[in-house]
Amino acid sequence: MHTGSGSGTGTGGATGDERVPGDPSEQETVELPAPPAPPGRPPRDLLDTVAAWEPAVVTTDDGARHSLRLRPVRPETDLPLLTGWLGDPAAAEFWEPPRDPAERLAAQLRGDGRSVPCLGLLDGTPAGYWEIYRADLSALARCFPCLPHDTGMRTLLAPAAAQQPGLGARLLAAAGELILRSRPACGRVLAAPDVRDGAAVAALHRAGFRSVTEVPLPGRRAAVLVRAR
């Protein structure tokens, strides 16, 4: 998973108590084959059509109910916003080495569907960037015993969302619930933030994830956290 963070205002990464930097994407290193579709059937959707997932409910401290939707990224309209978030130096501290945001999105969008970049829309307003991915087909599966259909998430909170105390953990909890509800075959949601990113790990704990181990991933050491069905 992760939750990404940044500093400052504007379109930089997240800040404040809910500074949740993220789980770097290892998609470029992943070579595990996707399971083949049965003969005579079209290729399977590895993540059960993220675009069709129903929104999750986020209840804030004041009791208000809000809607969180994970909408696949549209580069033609979303790239300027995401370039600002992903390009923030504070966000890059816990994500993988700098990579052009356009290339990052294109690598996923032209892939086989094992990783889907999304905007997290809270009542229609961008609240963060999510990468929903098949953990059992990712680099994580090379060093952690993933189960079939384990689903990972990485998150970079928008600055406005990161500055609201407690909201980051609630968004992470809602996203985890959304994955489990939308993917019947998925028994666990995984997150793998950088072990140095204490804010991300703490927010994930508050969101119902539990720490299980630490593993080496390309360029960093990751804490693996799990939320089971």
Image: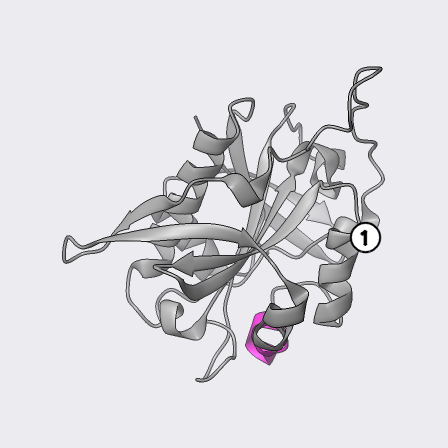
23 or 51: which is nearer to us? 51
Within 10 angstroms of label 1, few (less than 14), some, or many (20 or more) residues? few
Which span is picked out in magenta?
84-93
Please indicate whether residue 14 sits to the left or right of residue 39 in the image: left
- Residue 95: image x %, image y %? 64, 63
Query: Does residue 56 lie above or below 147 as drawn?
Result: below
Residue where numbered disc 1 is placed: 28
- Residue 58: image x %, image y %? 30, 49
| Residue drawn 43% across the image and 61% down it | 199
- Residue 53: image x %, image y %? 49, 40
Query: Does residue 204 lie above or below 197 as drawn?
Result: above
Please indicate whether residue 160 sits to the left or right of residue 141 in the image: left
Q: Is residue 191 visible?
A: no
| Residue drawn 49% across the image and 37% down it | 179
Does the magenta run of residues contain 86? yes
Q: Residue furthest top?
A: 39
Please indicate whether residue 9 sits to the left or right of residue 111 in the image: left
- Residue 104: image x %, image y %? 74, 62
Q: Residue furthest left?
A: 62
Query: Does residue 67 lie above or below 76 as drawn?
Result: above
Disc 1 is placed on an element classified as helix
Q: Residue furthest bottom?
A: 9
148 or 194: which is nearer to us? 148
156 or 18: which is nearer to us? 156
Q: Is residue 52 visible?
A: yes
Report the number of numbered marks.
1
Give, as a three-letter code, the residue at label 1. Glu
Please indicate whether residue 137 sits to the left or right of residue 165 in the image: right
